[in-house]
């Protein structure tokens, strides 16, 4: 059985500052939590940026460049930059930082979808910033756009242009078929790092049968041409990543995906979540991949070829 690659998604664009005091907002906080998560065992660090003044998601390359070099100088973990960005960002905005940074890896969402996180607003009594409530409540009318044209443009400009490979994010079964279509047309090349995502309203639900069906479908579509990973939102994070490890897959944790460490206990850092899933996997007699091993498994270009 291959070693398990642990990815950590450090801040994301879903959770807002009022949801957790531990969510990293400033470049310094993002860098510190990223480095600590790598030291805890994460081989891949998935990154978004936030406005350091109020925590709202930002595509500004200048903000990314305040933490990317710091992380690179402090750890050999693979740096994976979002191309999903934040709610309402254009494709050009979403690509601004990756095109400048030329990272080893970027996320790439494999289909347009409803993306409803409005329920989070009702659970917050006092918002720290005025932007948070409308940002969350507005998702009842939000479509996360990732057309076939968008996907091909991102692969062409970033993948073929700069040698960046992708974490293909699949929120539903149809997204796997979209990826298979791209593979058949040779738009993308194996090995495909396929992140199957559970528990986002608008995507496939966090049920065990869905986990198995997504894996069976990916096995059938991609055979040996893919590397399977799992993330799940909220309280489903640890159960689903544990199941993924048992089934021979890889895992993603982090405060982008869940603010919790256990029932009723907020995670105080990304490193706490990484340490927990690492302990679980090692107790199952699974070995954890180093960054160098992750690079080999995923055929990455190496950290010495990035633009920061």
Image (tube, rainbow, N blue to C red):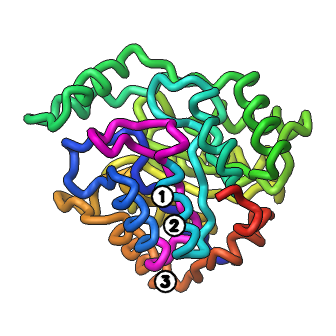
Percent across and percent down for residue 219 are 74, 52
Residue wearing tag 1: 67
Instruction: Compute the Cα span from label 1 to label 2.
Output: 6 Å
Pick the front one: 16 or 50: 50
Q: Secondary structure at mark 1?
A: helix
Counting other residues with Cα less than 10 Å from the Cα at mark 1, is it few (<14), some (14-19), or many (20 or more)?
Answer: many
Residue 55, placed above or below residue 269:
above
Residue wearing tag 2: 71
Residue 102, placed above or below residue 250:
above
Q: Earlier in the sequence, mark 3 or mark 2?
A: 2
Instruction: Say which residue appears at 31% left-offset and 41% top-offset.
Output: 55
Q: Secondary structure at mark 2?
A: helix
The N terminus, quarter of image: bottom right
What mark, if any, has residue 282 been given in the picture? 3
Percent across and percent down for residue 87 are 44, 28
Q: Earlier in the sequence, mark 3 or mark 1?
A: 1
Residue 7, placed above or below residue 115:
below
Q: For residue 80, what is the image quadrant?
A: bottom right
């Amino acid at each position: 059985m291959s070693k398990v690659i642990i990815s950590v998604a450090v801040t994301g664009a879903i959770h807002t500052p009022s949801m957790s005091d531990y969510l990293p907002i400033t470049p310094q906080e993002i860098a510190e939590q990223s480095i600590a998560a790598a030291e805890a065992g994460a081989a891949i660090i998935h990154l978004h940026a936030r406005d350091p003044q109020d925590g709202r998601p930002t595509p500004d390359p200048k903000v990314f460049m305040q933490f990317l070099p710091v992380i690179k100088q402090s750890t050999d973990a693979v740096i994976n930059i979002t191309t999903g960005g934040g709610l309402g960002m254009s494709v050009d905005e979403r690509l601004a930082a990756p095109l400048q940074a030329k990272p080893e890896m970027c996320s790439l969402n494999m289909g347009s979808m409803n993306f409803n996180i409005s329920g989070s607003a009702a659970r917050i009594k006092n918002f720290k910033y005025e932007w948070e409530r409308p940002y969350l409540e507005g998702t009842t009318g939000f479509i996360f756009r990732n057309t076939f044209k968008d996907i091909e443009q991102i692969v062409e400009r970033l993948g073929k242009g700069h040698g960046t490979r992708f974490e293909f994010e699949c929120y539903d079964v149809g997204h796997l078929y979209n990826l298979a279509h791209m593979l058949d047309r040779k738009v993308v090349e194996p090995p495909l790092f396929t992140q199957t995502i559970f528990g986002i309203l608008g995507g496939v639900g966090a049920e065990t049968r869905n986990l198995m069906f997504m894996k069976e479908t990916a096995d059938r579509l991609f055979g040996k041409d893919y590397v399977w990973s799992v993330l799940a939102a909220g309280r489903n994070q640890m159960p689903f990543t544990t199941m993924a490890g048992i089934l021979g897959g890889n895992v993603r944790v982090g405060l982008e995906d869940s603010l919790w460490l256990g029932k009723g206990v907020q995670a105080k850092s990304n490193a706490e979540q990484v340490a927990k899933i690492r302990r679980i996997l090692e107790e199952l007699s699974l070995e954890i991949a180093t960054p160098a091993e992750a690079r080999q498994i995923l055929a990455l270009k190496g950290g010495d070829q990035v633009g920061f």
